Image (spheres, rainbow, N blue to C red):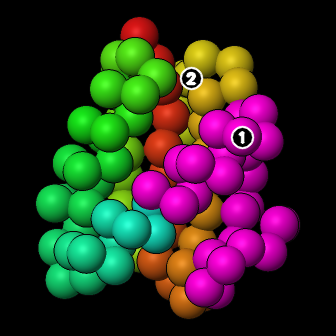
């Protein structure tokens, strides 16, 4: 796990460093802006990632979920905030 700003921890990623940092900052911004609405935060992240890196990005934000996804190489980020809120961002065209 990689420690980050504001209590975020990267659990797993295969993104290049610059993309990882930008994606984590976007996730922090979205989750802070929509602290009580994970769906709106996920929508903001997805739309921003589609615009910046091309489609099709997918985002799941929540607590207590597992996942198994097919993703494009170097296009996956899985992180936690505060120990319980997880964010999974991946690209699969």
Q: Nearer the viewer, mark 2 or mark 1?
A: 1
Q: Which of the two discs, 2 and 1, labels the residue nearer the N terminus?
A: 1
Quarter of the view holding residue 93: top left
Q: Which residues are magenta?
A: 1-26
Label 2: state its secondary structure: loop
Residue position for label 1: 18
Query: Looking at the image, which residue is at 50% across and 34% down?
Result: 90
In the figure, is residue 10 to the left or right of 3?
A: left
In the figure, is residue 77 to the left or right of 32?
A: right
Residue position for label 2: 71
Quarter of the view holding residue 52: top left
Instruction: Report if residue 91 is visible in the image.
Output: yes
Quarter of the picture containing the N terminus is bottom right
Label 1: state its secondary structure: helix
Q: Say if the magenta span includes residue 79.
A: no
Measured as percent of width and height from the top left, residue 17 is found at 78, 42
Q: Is residue 83 above or below residue 76?
A: below
Residue density around tag 2, few if under 14, some if 14–19, many if 20 or more, within 10 Å: some
Q: Is residue 36 above or below residue 59?
A: below
Q: Say if the magenta span includes residue 18.
A: yes
In the figure, is residue 54 to the left or right of 3?
A: left
Instruction: Report if residue 66 is visible in the image.
Output: no
Marks 2 and 1, Cα distance to the nearest angstrom? 19 Å
Measured as percent of width and height from the top left, residue 37 is found at 17, 73
Instruction: Name the residue furthest top.
Output: 93
């Amino acid at each position: 796990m990689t420690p980050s700003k504001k209590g975020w921890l990267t659990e797993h990623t295969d993104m290049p460093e610059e993309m990882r940092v930008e994606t984590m900052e976007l996730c922090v911004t979205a989750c802070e802006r929509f602290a009580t609405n994970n769906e709106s935060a996920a929508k903001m992240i997805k739309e921003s990632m589609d615009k910046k890196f091309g489609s099709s990005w997918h985002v799941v934000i929540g607590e207590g979920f597992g996942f198994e996804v097919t993703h494009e190489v170097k296009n996956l980020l899985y992180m936690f905030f505060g120990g319980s809120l997880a964010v999974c961002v991946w690209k699969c065209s």
